């Protein structure tokens, strides 16, 4: 199944200058718990923003890029073949972890969204998660948290 995991502000903002908007440790712990030992798919910008040569540890990292040859010899699996990722998701849980262009690309195929909904607006924002409310319904709120003055809900949405 294809799933997405994302943290958004009240305007669906997700990033600024290739960084996250918020640094929420408990949210990161949730992200890790959900994706550990699984398959994560990300765009080149998000891969670079991790600042980890080998990607996220203890996960199969797939980078979506129009230039997979640039990743040769790095040990990172890079592809432009979207269909192969969709085929993989028919047999395994695949987590799309961003950023904006990759969420946009895969949203039509996603069945579940794990959305960390921060209740305030990011100070500066230049990237957004696509509109999803029309096609997804809120299944449950996993938890409500407060951290560093930010309030947020971790929500599970499923395709209508
Ligand atoms: N809040 C969150 O949960 C969250 C999560 C992840 C990321 N983010 C934020 O999102 C921002 C990055 O988002 P972004 O949209 O700029 O970058 P991105 O989606 O991470 O990466 C964009 C790159 O993906 C590749 N790509 C895009 N569409 C493609 C396609 N159809 N086929 C093949 N490759 C394709 C291209 O790589 P090439 O140039 O190599 O071809 C493109 O430059 C950052 O601020 C990051 O911190 C936030």
Image: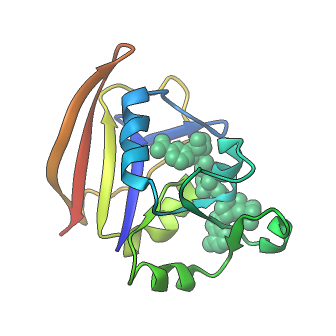
- Location of the N terminus by quadrant is bottom left
In the rendering, at what x and y percent does residue 32 appear? 43, 45
Using the rendered image of the protein, determine whether residue 28 is visible from the camera's viewpoint: yes
**Quadrant of the image where one finds ligand 1:** bottom right
Which quadrant of the figure has residue 70? bottom right
In the rendering, at what x and y percent does residue 64 appear? 64, 68
Count up the numbered dots.
Answer: 0
Residue at image x 65%, y 40%?
A: 18
Closest to the observer, 133 or 113: 113
- Location of the C terminus by quadrant is bottom left
Closest to the observer, 84 or 131: 84
Residue at image x 63%, y 50%?
A: 46
Which quadrant of the figure has residue 78? bottom right
Decide if residue 157 is on the left or right side of residue 28: left
Q: Is residue 10 above or below residue 6?
A: above
In the rendering, at what x and y percent does residue 104 appear? 49, 63
Residue at image x 23%, y 56%?
A: 157
In the rendering, at what x and y percent does residue 121 appear? 40, 27
Decide if residue 68 is on the left or right side of residue 46: right
């Amino acid at each position: 199944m294809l799933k997405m995991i994302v943290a958004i502000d009240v305007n669906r903002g997700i990033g600024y200058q290739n960084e996250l908007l918020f640094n929420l440790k408990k949210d990161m712990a949730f992200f890790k718990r959900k994706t550990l030992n699984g398959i994560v798919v990300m765009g080149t910008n998000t891969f670079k923003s991790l600042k980890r040569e080998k990607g996220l540890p203890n996960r199969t990292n797939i980078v979506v890029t129009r230039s997979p040859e640039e990743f040769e010899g790095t040990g990172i699996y890079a592809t432009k073949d979207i269909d192969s990722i969709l085929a993989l998701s028919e047999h395994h849980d695949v987590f799309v972890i961003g950023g904006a262009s990759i969420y946009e690309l895969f949203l039509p195929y996603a069945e579940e969204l794990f959305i960390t909904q921060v209740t305030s607006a990011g100070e500066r924002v230049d990237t957004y998660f696509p509109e999803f409310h029309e096609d997804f319904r809120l299944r449950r709120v996993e938890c409500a948290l407060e951290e560093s003055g930010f309030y947020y809900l971790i929500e599970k949405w499923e395709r209508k």
